Image (cartoon, rainbow, N blue to C red):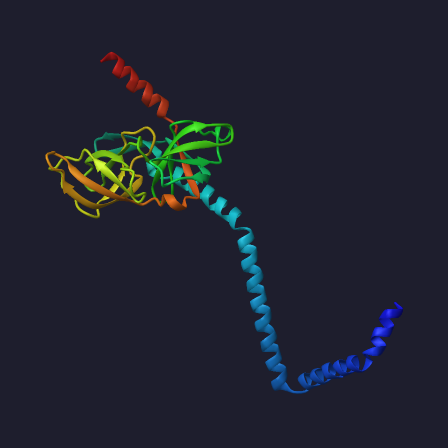
Amino acid sequence: MRLLFLLLWRNNFTIVFFLLQGLSFYLLIENNKYQNASVLNATNAVVTKTTEGVSYVREYIHLRENNQFLADENARLRAQLREASYQSDTNRTEVNDTLTKQQYTFITAKVINNSVNRRNNYLTLNKGKLQGIRPEMGVITSNGIAGIVKQVSDHYCTVMSLLHKDSRISAKIKSNNFFGSLVWDGSDPRFASLNEIDKTVPVKVGDTIVTTAFSSIFPADILIGVVSSKELRKGSNFHDIRVKLTTRFDNLTYVYVVDNLMKNEQRMLEEQSNTQD
């Protein structure tokens, strides 16, 4: 305490000077409208900028929570789409009696590991058995398809990416419904090939490629990509079709795991038919 008083005593002239200077500014501002308005405007500008900065910091801190909330909301909305329902239409005279039953549900998951530069690429998601994930579930993004679930533990799962040599996706040209098999050639993660499209089928650059209803893994009409180039394969009756994928595999963060509620029923019936043959 003694040292504090000694310090104040040694600097008493400086302290008195600043106090008088502050008092002078106060009297000048209070007794002059122009200076008063100028100071208020400057103060408001500083407060506004400070408030904006605090708001940006808060938004950044809660960015992860907001992203998760949006992903969950998208999953709920996808489950309400017509494509997520089983359509059973009965036509009687001119009345269309449609019974809609839920066929697909969607589980949000975060990508915690990913590769794009290998011949066989995989994703790892932060959801597993305890969250309802099972092998052979489809995985899609907000822009297209990503892959198929392979291995599952209690809290995690691995996904065979579309960028894998064994990946085969049933796909069709949206404009005419001709279908083939979508595969990745192992070169560019932005492109894949649509095979088994007969040379007589009209194909145009820019045609939209979507999933078919033939697979029990993906719903029909999920976007895959667009035709970027096409040519007739030499010595073959099929097109060579190059598809630019709408999914960007090099920046995946959140995905949706597709649960087909009628998969087992469909597969059991198909297996019975194959056994009878």
Note whether 257 is above or below 249 in the view shown: above
Quarter of the picture holding the C terminus: top left
Residue positioned 81% across, 78% down in the render: 11
Frontmost residue, 66 versus 156 = 156
Which corner quadrant of the image does residue 239 belong to? top left
Q: How many marks?
A: 0
Say above or below: 272 vs 83.
Answer: above
The quadrant where residue 152 appears: top left
Residue drawn at (60%, 69%) of the image: 47
Camera-side residue: 196 or 73? 196
Q: Is residue 28 left or right of residue 127?
A: right
* Quadrant assignment, res 185: top left
In the picture provided, is 230 more to the left or to the right than 4? left
**Nearer-the-camera pick, 99 or 122:** 122
Residue 88 % position (x, y): 29, 29
Percent x, y for residue 62?
A: 55, 51
Residue drawn 48% across and 47% down?
A: 67
Q: Quadrant of the N terminus?
A: bottom right
Q: Estimate the x, y position of residue 131 in percent, counting from the top left.
A: 49, 31
Say whether residue 203 is left or right of residue 133: left
The furthest residue to the right: 2
